[in-house]
Amino acid sequence: MKKSLLVLSGVLAISAALAGCGSKSEDKPAETSGGAATSGTKAPVTIKVQGWYTEAQGNWNKTVEAYNATHPNVKVVYESMSEKGDSQEGMKKLDLLAASGEQMDVVMYSSASDFAQRVGAGILEPLDEYLKKDNIVVKDEYKLDPIVNGKYYALPGKMIEWFVLLNKDKLDAAKLPVPTEWTWNDYAEYAKKMTSGEGAAKQYGSYFHNWKDYALLALNNNMDNPYLVKSDGTENIDNPQVRFSLNLRNQMENVDKSSVPYFEVVSQKMAYRDVFYAGKTAMLATGNWMVGELALNAKFNTVFAPYPKYDAKDTNGLTEVGADFMGVAANSKNKQAAYDFVKWYTTEGIQTQGLFFSGWKKADINKNVEAILASGKPDQVKFIDKTSLLSTLKVNKSTKLVVPPTYALQQEKEYTTQVELFLTGKQDLEKTIATSKAKIEEIRKSNAK
């Protein structure tokens, strides 16, 4: 496959020199200061952990301090790449650091497609030799298997499964029960019954953000391939689940008017958290990272329901799965120490952090929830319905993780462009599917040999 150029959020292309930053001489664990290999050193080496979380969002200072307390030969420092806690802004700055040759040790990416693209650009160090030395079989230790072309370049940090948040007060007002198993058609009916008001005072039953995940609602709980392309880059959108998803959104937003219209979402630059906290929507399909955020920001009684099903006969709780992909920078001068931190954080560290759900198979879900709630504010935690949260988490079943081709972000952009045209009434469904297919195939071919 021809080497694809990494486009840094549409403004920066990684040069050929950057693609060579992980040379063959660095394929094996380096003998460096840090971690288990540093028992004889006097001064600790400094390892930078770089991500987009703010301290309020990530509790990173407490986390790295816990690691430093038990690893005196290493000083881990967390650096936020975004004052707003914006993952896309953070990854853009990480790309700039990589291009400029600044110190990078432990880096994180928020989606499989973002991660895959950086692998393709040579930014990440292969971890296979490190894992082999520690006798770690990733698919046995972790709930996700982030393998890329037969190699491991990251381990799963925060594990993301999806569910639905519901405003309990609005649910009660509509005399609706907390869902424990439901379909997308049921979801649409709930949205209609919880929509009220007009104009600026209107309160919607539902909100869908402008991410590609919300343009693949029913595909997201397809066990075998919940992504818009297959692993070889060929399209996966010309199917009933994608058509259903787009028709559902069009019906809810433009016909029933029970979900915030796409045009308002993008023109007003809406933030999904703010929409939910403000009571503008009664329901929000989102990821489990919101539990930690609710523990700090909840403003009303919130209950949880499983991700809706495409078909009533489908398995309950099927949800798309994702993670923060945490790896070692290929240009790090302390790769062993960086890897040691990655290994610790993705197993024990997340429990210490107390904000996110772990992708480690040995993590206890009950203790994970308790740790997250304990890190919150009592006045906000009281609004979280622990019973529905635990029952939802325990019924969740992750679909297969798809690590797409390195050029998948380009395909996502083309698809979401076509979806926008459809949801704003500028083209019909069949043209949306046909044009998306053609664009996706064009990108695949341009990146082929």
Image: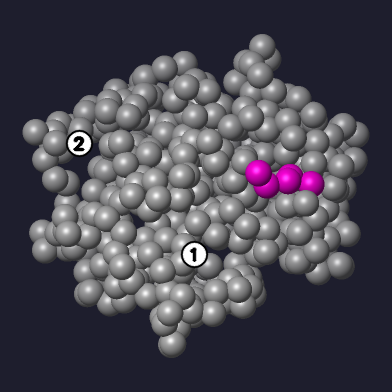
Q: Which residues are magenta?
A: 362-366
Please give left or right for residue 396 compared with residue 247 in the image.
right
Count neighbours of disc 1 (C-alpha within 10 A) and say few if under 14, some if 14 to 19, many if 20 or more: many
Quickly name the residue at label 1.
Answer: 341
* Tag 2–tag 1 contact (CB < 8 Å): no
| Mark sitting on residue 111 | none
Quickly name the residue at label 2.
Answer: 443
Q: Residue at x 77, y 66 (%)?
A: 376
- Of marks 2 and 1, the one in the foreground: 1
Quarter of the image for the N terminus: give it.
top left
Please give left or right for residue 67 compared with residue 363 in the image.
left
Please give left or right for residue 293 compared with residue 92 in the image.
right
365 falls in the magenta region: yes
Instruction: Using the image, determine if residue 44 lies above or below residue 287.
Output: below
Q: Please name the amino acid that badge 2 sits on.
A: Ile
Q: Residue at x 55, y 41 (%)?
A: 141
Instruction: Using the image, determine if residue 290 lies above or below residue 352.
Output: above
Query: Residue furthest toward the bottom?
Result: 43
Total number of numbered labels?
Answer: 2
Q: Residue at x 87, y 42 (%)?
A: 387
Place of residue 391 in the rendered image (x, y in percent of width and height, measured from the top left) = 80, 36
